[in-house]
Amino acid sequence: MVAASPDRPHPGSGRLKAVLGPTNTGKTHLAIERLCAHSSGAIGFPLRLLAREVYDRVVAIKGAHQVALITGEERIEPSQARWKLCTTEAMPRAFDKGAAVPRSFNFNNGAAVPRGADLAFVALDEAQLCADRERGHVFTDRLLNLRGREETMILGAATLAPMLRKLTPEAEIVSRPRFSTLAHAGAAKLSRLPRRSVIVAFSTAQVYAVAEMLRRFRGGAAVVTGALSPQTRNAQVALYQAGEVDYLVATDAIGMGLNLDVDHVAFAGLSKFDGQRQRRLTVAEMAQIAGRAGRHQRDGSFGTLSGSGGHDAAFSAEEIHAIEENRFPALTALRWRDAEPGFASLAGLIADLEAPPRREGLVAAPEAIDLAVLKRLGEDAEIADTLRAPQQLRRFWQVCSLPDFRQHGAETHAQFVARLWQELRDGPLGDDHAPRAIAQLDTVSGDIDTLQARIAAIRSWSYIAQRPDWVRAHAEMAARARAVEARLSDALHARLTERFVNRRTAVLMKKLGPDAGLLPVTLDGDSVLVDGETIGTLTGFRFRVEPSARHGDHKLLLAAAERHLPGLLTARARAIVALCMDTPAALVLQDGAIRWQGEPIALLQRGRRLLAPRLVPAPALGLLPGDARAALMAAVTAWWARRLKPLAPLRRMDAACDDAAAGAGLRALLIRLVENGGAVARADADIARLDARQRDLLKRFGLRIGALDLYHPALLRRAALDLWRELALIDGRTPPALPEQMAPVVPRAGHRLRRATDVLPPCPPGYRALGGQWCRLDHADALLRAAHGRRAAAGSRLFALDPAGALALGLGTCAYARLLAL
């Protein structure tokens, strides 16, 4: 087979077919079908990740031992491989049937690929890239020289048709319509974008800014930029495809090669820097990106972001019509550069690479970075001295063709190539050079920018390691480099996800719609999980937002709680209602609130009377449905009524305060008893003014008229005093604190620390102060009754007191003397 040249069309021996049309026409799927239908074949793709994706599909059909993947950074080439998936740069220039050509390597912007292969089928994907400034000359060369023995297929946009008719008149051109329609949807705010949208920006900074806003508003987004490794891009795309996020923010790299389930494409701008100047996108570029929306039979839409730019950030009517109708200006020229320059001299090599084409329809390619590096380093006299022999010059050109994965520009890339050439000019790299360089990059610490820089660097070494004449044990070194790239890519994916995805928020945003009631809400301990994501903790009936959530997410999480917690709270309320009946001790009164597991359920507020406080639901019950809250409050009210049982005598006195028949004097005394917790000093009770009937009523209430105090014995118990004190605090009073142990006699708190200026603490309810000790009223009354009994028994005779009772209670001599003196 004779290779084509700019002056002579390719004669070809097999059918040449061009399948042209917009995105979503099934062109690539057709090419894969035709590839697998032939005994052998190859397809060239514009992106490594697309080549990898199709490689996996063909492997599933043909088996791994018969399929090869050939890219600049990766080679999987079994000895029996008959079907090859390549990047366009890595494809051979011609498949010459039976040609006695030794195995050679073409590193013109691509990986080492053997020539002389004989394949039945060959296809070139996205052939309209023949007009691209940077890569167009490679695609044009493959378009003119790639032929299959039986069939050759060119895939691309319809804009390529006129140039195909001019350059390959033998080609059969078939147009394919788009499976679905693409409609303009106008401008929309970021917060109003529909789900399953892709937002396209034209700088990494803008991509990150949009992704950060989506994280706050919608739970986050996947991120795709040209600086990401293919593995990281695939991982981010998988995040979107799996539905973990509903948005993807990308540069215009999204316009080619990535098959996504996208409903809408929103442009954050319509201009970009193309390496030389800031310019507006061509309508074909707009359509290539917008065409990502819609899949198979599902229609798609495109539009812009509101407020994302000036007047040029909106589509014109002509652009909208062209995109919707798939009508674009035809290509008028394809880029070309001599793919087989001469190596007799450096000047001749440069001249060949800069030579204009001699065929109509082809134009010289702009200076690519490999040529720029060649010319810069050729000016270095020390390097130029090493390029005397054609073999050395060819090798030098291969080194200059190393892609600039770092995207640092010609000057910086030339410095890296110069250092590499110093090592390669006399043979392969030193045994420790590649392992050391690869090992230095094998660290996953650092931020997003640091990891991206390491990935770019390791991609360079993946490319270098593919050359057997550059690196000893190249297969091992290539495997090491790919392993490092995989680890760095995983780390970068994790950093991007950590920074731009809040899965909890994403899950909630998707579920706060009409189907929110179907969302599974569960409790893991006190943690509230919505669809497996923790949104906060539930303590009692109080929901607390997850502490790790950002402040901006609190409103969303609270909204989610309001939507999804009522079911859990209702179940919890029913459980507490049962506890009120079966296990009343599960609820406690503390600090003016009825609590369950330490959390308030109901609050006691000051009422018209001390013993009748108002019972109101705690604010935490706000998320509890009304009927469940009513049932819970009814059970708590019943529990509270039972809880007041220790104060039953006091409640009877309180009720008698309203009885006019009791008489004013008795009613006043009863009010004082209620206010004091059931005890009043006899000196203040004015019992002498009560008549016999009123005194009889006092006894009916269970009150005991002691020598010093009027008190009710049952109300001196700890449970009654604690409960009365709680009610007094609720009523706005500050009764003295009770001693830790309600013993008959306790030390008077702080009496040993007393100074002249000190104020002794007030006597707690139910006790009488006796110097350095407090004695409970009923025991003080018993001691006095015993003393008075001895006195009565002695008559007018002298008598001796028996201190045994006081000593048994722990009452000191001084305190006992004070008691007897009262």
Image: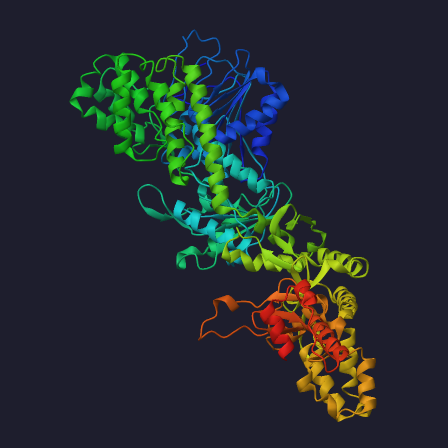
| 168 up-or-down from 636: above or below | above
> Can you name the residue that lies furthest to the front here?
797
Q: Can I make out residue 393 in this image? A: yes
Q: Position of residue 433 (x, y in %)?
A: 32, 18
Q: Position of residue 466 (x, y in %)?
A: 41, 18
Residue found 53% across the figure and 56% down from its top: 553
Q: Can I make out residue 223 in this image? A: no
| 213 up-or-down from 85: above or below | below
- Viewer-proximal residue, 286 or 565? 565
Q: Position of residue 623 (x, y in %)?
A: 67, 63
Q: Is residue 650 left or right of residue 803?
A: right
Residue found 59% across the figure and 23% down from its top: 58
Residue found 59% across the figure and 31% down from its top: 29
| 766 up-or-down from 332: above or below | below
Query: Which color scheme is applied?
Result: rainbow
Quadrant for residue 331, please give it: top left
| 397 up-or-down from 50: above or below | above
Number of numbered discs overlaid on the protein picture? 0
- Viewer-proximal residue, 424 or 217? 217
